[in-house]
Image (cartoon, rainbow, N blue to C red):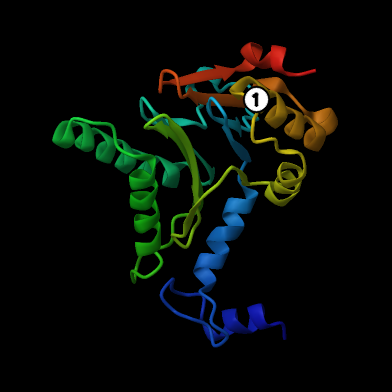
């Protein structure tokens, strides 16, 4: 009997707090599988800012495109995307927005992106050790500009987070990261980063590529303000 099936029979996957004999938290690993099924996002730190290109993956034509955002505005200078369950993401994004506004009210200055991703990661980690609660089924990509420097962070289901020059989460993330490792240029501008990210998606989706399913958010160092692009606005970035 395969070890995973044996662990299920023994009941090691009944709670997020129960380790299997070989040291796995099975509920956490199941949540990680949910993340890999989610639509992908690519984040790139550029010389003049930071950009996230997100696949909204809207299949129902009845849904208004304007109402379906994959990129959340945490504050004027910070944005975030996710892979996994939208409802879970909304809860963490709401918490991050509150922390960002509390920082402005308390200290009179914008919150540092690392403070926000740490709060998100702490909450994700906490839900891997509470009885009666399940882990958040998302990975979070947070990007922002602070003190004239661009930042990109990613947290996972377990509550770990790291800073990146570029990263991908969600469906086909390993394929995308291989391209990023090979072709990323650290002196890219935001505009070049958008073209690069959309080209990666175009190569992966091939005939199924549709510009209307993508949303782009970018923050430039010059003004530290989130700007959005989607649909027809992205056509000029695709060859």
Front residue of 221/38: it is 221
Question: Residue 94's x, y, as percent?
Answer: 33, 39
Question: Residue 216's x, y, as percent?
Answer: 57, 25
In this view, the residue farthest toward the right is 207
Tell me the residue that label 1 is attached to.
194
Q: Which residue sits at x=62%, y=24%?
A: 189
Question: Residue 214's x, y, as percent?
Answer: 63, 26
Front residue of 130/6: it is 130
Q: Which residue sits at x=30%, y=43%?
A: 95
Can residue 87 be seen from the camera position used here? yes
Q: Is residue 148 above or below residue 237?
A: below
Can residue 79 be seen from the camera position used here? no
Question: Residue 69's x, y, as percent?
Answer: 50, 27
Front residue of 97/6: it is 97
Kindly indicate the quadrant of the structure image that contains residue 24.
bottom right
Q: Which residue sits at x=83%, y=32%?
A: 206
Task: Provide the secondary structure element on which disc 1 rests.
Answer: helix
Q: Which quadrant does the N terminus fall into?
A: bottom right
Q: Is residue 114 left or right of residue 155?
A: left
In this view, the residue farthest toward the left is 106
Q: Which quadrant does the C terminus fall into?
A: top right
Q: Is residue 85 above or below residue 159?
A: above
Kindly indicate the quadrant of the structure image that contains residue 223.
top left
How many C-alpha atoms fall within 10 Å of the one at disc 1: few (<14), some, or many (≥20)? many
Q: Is residue 193 left or right of residue 88?
A: right
């Amino acid at each position: 009997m395969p070890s995973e099936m044996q662990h299920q029979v023994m009941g090691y996957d009944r709670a997020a707090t129960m380790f299997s004999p070989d040291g796995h938290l099975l509920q956490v690993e199941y949540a990680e599988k949910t993340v890999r099924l989610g639509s992908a996002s690519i984040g790139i730190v550029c010389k003049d800012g930071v950009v996230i290109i997100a696949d909204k993956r809207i299949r129902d034509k009845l849904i208004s495109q304007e109402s379906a955002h994959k990129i959340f505005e945490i504050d004027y200078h910070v944005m975030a995307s996710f892979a996994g369950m939208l409802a879970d993401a909304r809860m963490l994004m709401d918490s991050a927005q509150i922390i960002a506004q509390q920082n402005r009210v308390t200290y009179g200055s914008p919150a540092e992106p690392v403070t926000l991703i740490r709060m998100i990661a702490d909450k994700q980690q906490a839900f891997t050790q509470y009885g009666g609660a399940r882990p958040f089924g998302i990975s979070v990509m947070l990007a922002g500009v602070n003190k004239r420097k661009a930042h990109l962070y990613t947290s996972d289901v377990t509550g770990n987070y790291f800073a990146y020059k570029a990263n991908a989460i969600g469906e086909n993330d390993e394929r995308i990261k291989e391209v990023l490792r090979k072709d990323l240029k650290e002196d890219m501008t935001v505009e070049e980063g958008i073209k690069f990210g959309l080209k990666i998606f175009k190569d992966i989706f091939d005939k199924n590529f549709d510009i209307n399913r993508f949303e782009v958010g970018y923050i430039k160092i010059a003004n530290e303000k989130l700007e959005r692009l989607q649909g027809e606005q992205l056509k000029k970035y695709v060859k």
